[in-house]
Structures are given as C-alpha cells and as structure tokens.
Amino acid sequence: MWLFAQGKEYFLPYGEFPWFADAKVSSVYNVQLLHGHHLHWPDLDVDLDIESLSDPKQFPLKAKNK
C-alpha cells in the first residue's frame, strides 16, 4: 500500500502491515492524522506513528497475523 502523508510517500508492504491486506478500500481511506504525527484508522483499529514509517529501523517490532 502507498501512503501519502505530510508531503511524503511511504510504502507499506502487506507482509509488514497485514491489517491493510484484506481491508475494504473505504476503511483504508478513513484515516485521521492526530497530533501532527499519529495516523489512526478507526475502522481497522490501527495506529501508526509517522516516524515509524520514516525510519523503520528504529522500530523493529513487526505485526504478526493472527
């Protein structure tokens, strides 16, 4: 998935961000930017900090499929 936030593009591969793989497009488009750096997808109950997308090496934890 490609994400454009705060003037930058980010690539979020489904292997590392599995919440988006089977999500409805309307749920992916329903995203909020909170506090200038926090992305929140209320329909998916997903929260990401933009810094984790800018420098993923600083955030080595990855989501696991249930």
Image (spheres, grey):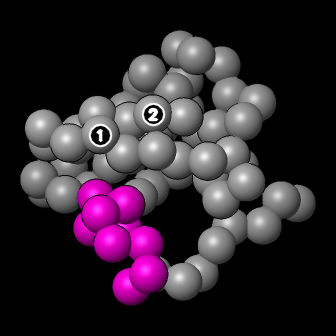
Q: Which residue is drawn at 61% across and 47% down?
A: 13
User: Label 2: which residue?
Assistant: 2
Q: Earlier in the sequence, mark 1 or mark 2?
A: 2
Query: What kind of element bears circle 1?
Result: strand
> Is most of the magenta stretch helix, strand or loop?
helix
Q: Which residue is drawn at 65% across and 59% down?
A: 16
Disc 1 and disc 2: Cα gap in Å? 7 Å
- Residue type for callout 1: Glu
Q: Nearer the viewer, residue 21 or 43?
A: 21
- Extreme residue toward the right, this view: 66
Res. 43 image quadrant:
top right
- Residue type for callout 2: Trp
Magenta region: which residues?
50-58
Q: In this view, does 15 lie to the left or right of 35?
A: right
Q: Dot 2 surroundings within 10 Å: few (below 14), some, or many (20 or more)? A: few
- Vertical placement of residue 65 versus 62, above or below: above
Q: Does the magenta stretch include residue 55?
A: yes
User: Where residue 9 is drawn, which disc sits there?
Assistant: 1
Query: What kind of element bears circle 2?
Result: strand
- Image coordinates of residue 12 in percent, x first then y, are 52, 47
Q: Nearer the viewer, residue 18 or 10?
A: 10
Assess whether mark 2 and mark 1 are in contact (beta carbons under 8 angstroms).
yes
Residue 53 seen = yes
Residue 49 seen = no
Q: Which of 5 and 35 is in front in this view?
A: 5
